[in-house]
Structure formats: structure tokens, C-alpha cells
Image (cartoon, helix red, strand yellow):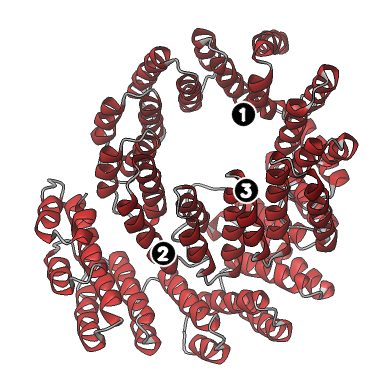
Amino acid sequence: MARAMARAGDADRAEGLARSGTDPNEQAGALATVAQALAAAGDLDRAEALADSIRDPRTRVHALADVVTALAEHHCDRAWALAGRAEEAAHAITDADERAHALADVAQAIACAGDPDRAEDIARHITRPYVQTRVLARQVRAIAETGDFARARAMIRVQHGAEQRARALTTLVEVAAAAGDVPRMLALAREAEAEAGSVSRRREVLELADLVAAVADAGDRDWAVLLTDRAATVAGSLTADDSVGPVTDEDVQAFALTELAETVARAGDPDRAEALAVSIPGPSHQTSALARLACVAARVGDSDRARTLALRVETAVRASTDSRRRTNELSALAKAVAATGDSNRAESIASLISAPRDRSSALTGVVHALARTGQSGPARAVAGRLADLAATMTDDRQQPWALIDAVRAMAYAGDLDRAEDLAVSLPTGYNRTEAQVVLMQVAADAGDMVRAARLAEQITDRYRQPKVLRALVTAASQAGDREQMADIADQVAALVKLAKPHDGGIDTNEIRFLVSAVARAGEPERAAAIARSMGDRFNRNATLAELTSVAADEGHTVRAEALAGQVTDAQFRVEALAHLALAVAVAGDHDRVRPLVDQAEAELGAIGRPTMTPPLPELATALARTGDWGRAEALAQSITAPQLRAQALFALARESDDPAAARRYVAWAFRSPDWTHSLDALVGIHPDAVAPLADEYLRSTAQMD
């Protein structure tokens, strides 16, 4: 609310609200948020004064940096003067970690304001290596993406830390690869390979793995093999001393080798990846690595290999005493039974889960299922018992997550006041913020704009801002508040400009979801403009494909087709075409469906080994709508990812007018080892079958026990 008032010009009330908080940390965060909003609204004097008044040194520097960025566009001299004060304040911070992060904020603001030389000079004063690494990589990426590789490369030469140089060089390799500049990329990769030998051994493995992917994509398979062998040798020699925390030599080696194996598989060498996976010490680590390789094989369309690996993983899991599989199955069954209306039975099944944290998660799913089917009384009762369970937990690491589950469950059940009371009772910090984010999202979905806005004002962590704005978009849309929607869209556009890929900060997936939420809220043209403004090619294409899906879902096939035409990445273009084909089929224009499916399949064939899961369920459903059941069925059967295969088969069952065929599709879906993925769909088309299935499962597992 304070932010909204500041942007509307009511600075006095905004500041008053921000200062009304009793917790010093929350008050500092709220003041920083208001200062940022005032700067964006053009009230620069008030913004600067407010930022300067913040007592917490780290938050004060962050707020001043935001004002520097706002000033730079039209008031350069004043921006540089304020930047100098922000830098002085950052240097005055006594805590080394806080000082490093504050200097990073100042350097980023100055770089965004157009003075990379000064930003580079400030970055040299950062004493924490991991912050230096992140800042340098950001600066190098930003400069290289403008095409000035020489300047970016020169920045790396003057750095003194080996890990900073290695990460920055690898970043340049990635930018050159994305730009299609293969000669430059290969030359930089040679430098990066040499630099990788100067870093810590664990870091060396990760840097070499990134180079394997880039070099393999450029077609130099022999070099990729040599890099892989070098990385594997280093990974196999790692010890617990190469990491932090209570880990064993086996744990450290397994992590490094698993990451390397997955990268090699994505780079198109599945045999070598599999050999790396089986070399990992410890059967549980091996099984985990093979499972990840099975997912990679499924995503690239290698169905035979995916099935073989999946069977090996299943055999290993069945032979182990691991209870995770049973926990997942009981949780899925409990939610499915709740969705059919049997709350007592659902809660009873969830209670069979022995680990309290897992049980609380399952009960949250039960409450959600009950609430979605209109059973508010049982939902509130289960949520209350879940809160009691969380309160009695004694594990300090697990209890906060169980309490967050309880907040979520109460919110789902419609008891928002009690949920908010529980969220506020959590200690200040990460867990309370996480609970507030959860509650804010549920309140927004429920149309409670006032509560959602109030909670949003309390969440000042910049990394959670995409979720905050997405919730506000939803609430403003449901309330029909066009003025608020326009204001939020401005904030979305500003946030997209700040978010950079691979910076370890704002989740770029959240940015894509946020932009699509703007489109769903009735601002499709603004959303498309924001998507096209994204500098990163991957995120731009992913967001345009998502917007194609939004337009298609809403029946705007002409707009969807235009958006699909703007997607330049082949894999995302396939995704856009699949959504468009399904929308056209739903609209009844069957003659247009087959050419779209043909185009999507041709694109898939040209890709060879896609790095993402192809959207085959949508294509199969579109074909079924046209009556081409043979082709639809073949597509569905070719999907190796269990969840997507079940999704496609249940979609065919829903489309079919033949009861025998529908039962056949359902039976095929449940043949998967991961049959729990089929439960949600089963509830939708045949809820009476859920209870007998639960009975049979509980009988069979009781006999096994």
C-alpha cells in the first residue's frame, strides 16, 4: 500500500505507513521500497532524502543505488554525486559480507547508469571472492551482449582472482555461443580451459562442464571428450575438504560427477554420460544420477534409452529400503481421495506417512483438494489439525516448513485471518517472508486485493518481487482495477530490465510467468511489448512462446499465430505451434490443425536432440480433435516422460466417445512405474475408481510390509 501511495504522489502517507512498522528490519525494507517508488514517480528529492534516512546501512545503500539509477537518465551530475555518497556509505559498513553486497549494489547502479569504468573500479574494492565473481560476470555479460567483446575481455585481464577470471571467461563463451559467433567462442573456450586449472578443484569441474556443453554444440566432439575426461579425473579425486558442511568424500564426488554426466548427456554424448554415472561411488548416488539421465533422454526424444534407464532406476529403488517412493504414493493417493469428497479417508491415508514434514505436505495437498471441490468445513478442520501437528514438531530445521504448510492450508481453506496470524507469529526473516508470500498469492487468487496489497508491502526482498507482482496482477484483474493494472505493468517492465540471466538473483522463470500473468489480466499487447524488450534471447523466446499459449487458451488464434511467428528459437517455436494447434482444433478449424502439427514435427526433426521436453501431449490432443486417432495415439505412446505420457493418454480418454477406447487409454497410463501422475486425471474422468484403487494399493503394500 505504501508503494502504491508513493507512485500516486501521496508521499506523506506513503512514508508514514513505511515508518509505522515496529520491526527495524521491516521498516528499513519498507522505506527502501517507498524511496524506489518515489524515484520512479519522479519525486527525486523526496526519494533521496528518504533513502538517506534509513538507519540500516546495507538497506540504505541499496535504496541510494536505486535512486542513482533513477537519477541517471536525466540528472547525470546529481546521480554521480549521490553514487559517491552511496559508495562511501558502503565502505563504512563494518561487516565484510554486508559491505561486499553493498558495493555490488553500487557498482551495478553505476554500470546501469552508463559508467562501466567507475563500476569496475568500485568492484575492485569488493573483498568477498564469491561476490566479486558474481559482479564481474554480470558486468562482462552486459558489455559483451552489446557486441563489445574486446572491452569485456579487457575487463577480465585486470582482475586478480583466478575463479573470477574463469567464471567471466566462461560467461563470455556463453554469450559468444548465443550470438552464433563460433570462432570467437572457440578461442575464448581455449582461454577458459587454461584458466580453469587455476581455480579450486570443485569449481574446475563445474567450469569444465560448462565448456563441454559449449564446445560440443560448436561441433568439436573430440575436444569435448578431452574436457570431459579431464573433469571426470578431477571430480573423482575430490574430498570433503573441497566442500563445506557435513559431507563425505563420496558426497562431493557424486555431486560433481552427476552434474558432469548430465551436462555431457545434454551435449549429445549419452554413452559417455552413462559411463560417468555408473562410476559414481555409492548406489544411491548412482541411482539419482541415472534418473537424471533418464529425464534428459526423455527430453531429447531418445525413448529407448529413457525406458532402459528408467527400468534400471526402478529396479534399484524397489531393491532399496528407501521410503520416499511410498511417501510420494501415499501423498498422491490422499489428494486424489480428497478430491472425490472423502475427507476422513484422505486424512487417514496421509497420516500413514511417518515423517512429520512429509505428512504436513501431504495434508496441505488434502486441504487444497477439499477446498477446490467446495468442502470448506472439512478443509478447515484438516488445516487446524495440520497447524497442531506443526506446533508439536521439535526439529528446528523442519518445523518452520511445516508451519508454512499450515499457513498455506489455512489460506486454501478460506481461513485467511488465522493464516495471517500464524504467518506473523513466525520469527522475522526468511520463513516469515516465505509464509507471507504464500498467503499473499492465495489472497490474490481469492480476489482479496486489500489483503494481497498489504502483504505485498511487507515483502521487500527483491528476489521475491516477481511473485509479489504476479499476485497483484491477479488481484487487480479480478477487481477490474485498470489503473492499478497499468501501474503494475510499469513495475513489471522495470523489473524485467533489471533481471539478468545467470546472476543468481531473480528467477527468470518467475519473470516469464509474471509477463504471462499481465497478458491473462487483459493487457496482452503490453505483455508482448515487455517480452520483446528482453535482452536475453532464451528468455525472450520462452516468454513469447508462453504468451502464444495464453492467447491460444483464450481463443485468440490470430494473435497467437502472430506471436508464434515472432519466436526465433526452434524448440520454443515448436511449443508455440503445439499450443496454437490445440487452440485451432478446439475452435473447430480442423483443416488448419494438420499443417500446424506437420510443421511442429518437422521442426522437431530438424532439431535432432532437443534439450527440452517436446509438447507432444498438446499435439496428440489436437490430432484427436480432428478425428485422426491413429496418429494421435502413436504420438501419445511415443512420449517417455511418465507424467506427460499420462497427461496425453488421459486427454485422449476425455476426447474419445468410445468407452472401450477410453478405458484402454487409462489402463496404458497406469502401466507406468510413476502411476501417481495419472491420479489427478483419473479424478476428473472417473472419480468412482479412486476409492477401489486406494483400497487395492493399501492392501498390496500391507502385504509387502
2 and 3 marks in contact (CB < 8 Å):
no
Mark number, residue 324 = 1
Considering depth in this image, is 570 or 519 the residue closer to the camera?
A: 519
Residue 336 in picture, x, y percent from top left? 59, 19
Residue ID for mark 3: 552
Considering depth in this image, is 473 or 111 the residue closer to the camera?
A: 473
Residue 284, compared with residue 512, is above or below; it is above
Q: Secondary structure at mark 1?
A: helix
Residue ID for mark 2: 493
Residue 85 in picture, x, y percent from top left? 19, 80
Q: Report whether 586 appears left or right of 350.
A: right
Give the CA separation, mark 3 to mark 1: 38 Å
Q: Residue at x 84, y 35 (%)?
A: 627
Residue 457 in picture, x, y percent from top left? 25, 49
Q: Quadrant of the C terminus?
A: top right
For residue 168, say whether it is visible. Answer: yes
How dense is the environment of label 3, judged by Cα within 10 Å: few (below 14), some, or many (20 and up)?
many
